[in-house]
Image (spheres, rainbow, N blue to C red):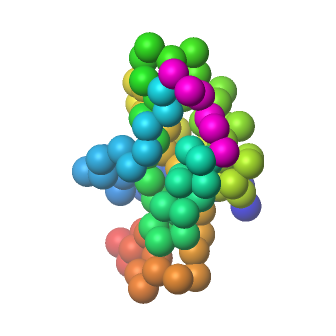
Amino acid sequence: MALTKQERKFLKGAAHHLKPIAQAGKDGMTEQFISGVNDALKSRELIKVKFLDTSELHPGEDGEILAGKIGAELVGTIGFVAILYRYTEKVKTHVLDSMTEE
């Protein structure tokens, strides 16, 4: 599912108030980290992941790799933070549904 430019812009705005839910540090992207991010996306469609500046990971490149491993979309990056989105049936209100209401 490729996001359109308008959807990416909307999702970046919707993620503005969110705090990072996971943090990738010196251990890199371990299976436990990937599993935690995947679980977070099961209950929320939009999350932020922080890449510590002391780690060798880069939010753009490694955010894209992480998104590929869990079937999500990298919406964008802001500094050391990556914004990830994945549609989930389980949530009551979907993030992109509010885009069509405006």
Residue at 71 percent of width and 37 percent of height: 65
Is residue 18 visible in this depiction of the protein?
A: yes
Nearest the camera: 7 or 35? 35
Q: Is residue 57 left or right of residue 71?
A: left
| 10 in relation to 96, above or below | above
Nearest the camera: 16 or 53? 53
Q: Which residues are magenta?
A: 26-31
Q: Residue furthest left?
A: 17
Q: Main secondary structure of the magenta part?
A: loop
Residue at 58 percent of width and 82 percent of height: 89
Is residue 85 visible in this depiction of the protein?
A: no
Residue 7 rendering spot, x and y as whole percentages: 53, 57
Q: Is residue 99 left or right of residue 74?
A: left
Residue at 56 percent of width and 27 percent of height: 27
| Residue 5 within the magenta-colored segment of the rendering | no
Residue 102 rendering spot, x and y as whole percentages: 35, 72
Nearest the camera: 87 or 28? 28
| 53 in relation to 71, above or below | above
Residue at 63 percent of width and 38 percent of height: 30
